[in-house]
Each structure stands twice: as structure tokens, then as C-alpha cells.
Image (spheres, rainbow, N blue to C red):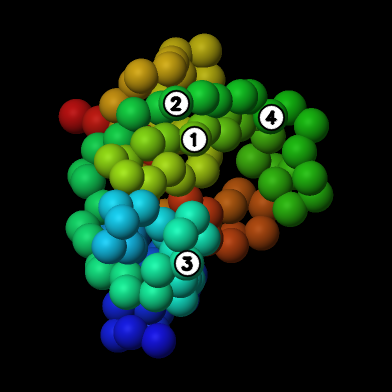
Amino acid sequence: MTAATDGGYDEFLDALADGDGYFYACSNGHGLLPPRQACPHCGDRELARRELPRTGTIVTHTTVSVPTPQFDDDAPYVTAIVEFGQVRLTGIVRRVDRDDVAIEQRVTATVEPSETTGDRTITFRPAQ
């Protein structure tokens, strides 16, 4: 395992919360999120840590009205898939009215607690 892949998902969330989000890239140009020891697309084990772009674009989203128990108090909420350059993150959109969330909207990523459990979750906010 290379030094770039020593960190796991908790380290990734810590970095994202601190504004220092990152992803891994293999020598064939595939982007991937931690934890990884090899590229799932080509099997490359030489992964380099790259800076996650500050803003991303919403690719798709949906409003969740009937959640799983671990997000019961958060509902209704918007879950989105957001493209940040070579990688896509899935998270909850906050600080914008549910009806105003749109495809191609620019957002930033951070980490905030779930209203239900307090567990950390990837959160998107409108970009300034």
C-alpha cells in the first residue's frame, strides 16, 4: 500500500470538514474516493492524492420524504450527487430551499452532523 492510501473514510471526512478535501487518482486518470488500495476501474495500485476542487456541480438530486430510521429527523431532505472534477460525491443539500435545488447548480462540500443520529454526513451548500 502506498502512503497515499493509508487514510480511510474518517480521515477523508476530517479533511473535507477542514476545507482540505481530496481524492485519489490512478496513473490512468481515474478518480476515486478513499479508502482505496487499488483503482476499481483498472486495478492500478499507484494512487496519488489530489486536491478536491472547491466547488462541484449537481448532476442529479431527489427529495427524500420517507427516510431510513437513521435520517428520520432530517426528513424531508434533498440528496444529491455532485461532480467535483474527476470524482462524484453523494450527500445532503442544506442551506437552500428544497424546491430551489437544481441540476448544474454549483455547491461546496463539507461535513455536518445528521439531525437524527449526530453522525457525520457529507453536506452540500450553495457556492458563493
Q: What is the spatial separation of the Cα atoms under label 3 and label 1, in whole angstroms?
A: 25 Å
Read off the residue under disc 2.
59
35 vs 87: above or below: below
Q: Which of the two discs, 2 and 4, sits closer to the camera?
A: 2
Q: Is residue 26 visible?
A: yes
Q: Nearer the N terminus, badge 2 or badge 3?
A: 3
Q: Which of the two discs, 3 and 4, sits closer to the camera?
A: 3
Residue at coordinates 51% horizontally, 33% vertically from top-left?
Answer: 80
Amino acid identity at mark 3:
Gly
Q: Is residue 54 left or right of residue 9?
A: left
Q: Nearer the N terminus, badge 3 or badge 4?
A: 3
Query: Residue 13 at what x, y percent from top left?
Result: 41, 64
Callouts 1 and 2 close, C-beta under 8 Å: yes
Q: What is the spatial separation of the Cα atoms under label 3 and label 4, in whole angstroms?
A: 35 Å
**Mark number displayed over residue 81:** 1
Q: What is the spatial separation of the Cα atoms under label 4 and label 1, in whole angstroms?
A: 14 Å
Q: Is residue 115 left or right of residue 54?
A: right
**Mark number displayed over residue 64:** 4
> How many neighbours does mark 3 have within 10 angstroms: few (below 14), some (14-19), or many (20 or more)?
few
Amino acid identity at mark 1:
Ile
Read off the residue under disc 3.
43
Q: What is the spatial separation of the Cα atoms under label 2 and label 3, in whole angstroms?
A: 26 Å
Q: Which of the two discs, 4 and 1, sits closer to the camera?
A: 1
